[in-house]
Amino acid sequence: MIELKKDQVPSHVIEKAVDKAKGGQGEDFAVARYEGYGPGNCMVIVDCLTDNPNRTFGDVRICFTKTNSKIGTQGSVSHMFDHSAIFVFKGDDEETALDALMAADVDVTDIECEEGNITIFAPHNEYFKAKQALLTAFEGIEFEVDEIQFIPQTPSPIADDDIEMFDKFIAMLNELDDVQNIYHNLEV
């Protein structure tokens, strides 16, 4: 700091830099969600974490336009997805899992038991309650999937002509640093 003073750096600039380094006035990140129709008219939701929403919107919009896709307004396709908490873990006792979730007053959307795995779908706003019920019911449980996702209500097939463009679209989105998750309704 003494060196900076010798170089005649104003004290407010020094204080701002120190605060930023401490995390006091660092970058503010915000969640941004973009929706639209991708190649083959599939429905797409793109979740981002950004420190510059204008830049991120421009970057995402380019991915849509360069692949003959159409970015929509908020809510244009999300109503066709279920926002669900998903838990997958090894086991075959779906009845114990269902009983534990019902006792915790979790509104279970679906429960499946296939190939030694139990898969549970619940509303996203009951994620914590569902997870705690499962942790209590199954000692030492290890989740293979433990997340909140958008699940399409009606999956859609894709024409062979559109597969290459869809792959390009997803690759372009994945190259963007701000993109966190991409959800779509295509049957892959």
Image: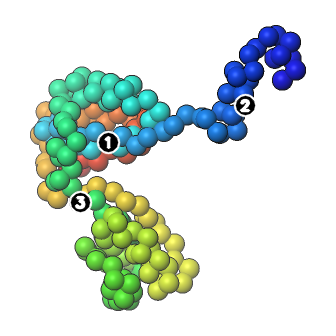
Answer yes or no: is residue 21 visible. Answer: yes
x, y percent for residue 90: 44, 75
The mark nearer the N terminus, 3 or 1, is 1
Q: Quadrant of residue 26?
A: top right
Residue at 19 percent across and 46 percent down: it is: 75
Answer yes or no: is residue 163 visible. Answer: no
x, y percent for residue 158: 14, 43
Nearer-the-camera pick, 77 or 142: 77
Nearer-the-camera pick, 185 or 50: 50
Mark carried by residue 33: 1
Q: Amino acid at mark 1?
A: Arg
Residue at 24 percent across and 29 percent down: it is: 64
Q: Amino acid at mark 2?
A: Val
Residue annotated with mark 2: 18
Q: Amino acid at mark 3?
A: Asp
Count of marks overlaid on the render? 3
Q: Nearer the viewer, mark 2 or mark 3?
A: 2
Residue annotated with mark 3: 82
Q: For the residue carrying disc 3, how many other residues have a C-alpha within 10 Å: few (<14), some (14-19), or many (20+)?
A: some
Q: Which image quarter holds the N terminus?
A: top right
Image height check: is 7 above or below 60? above
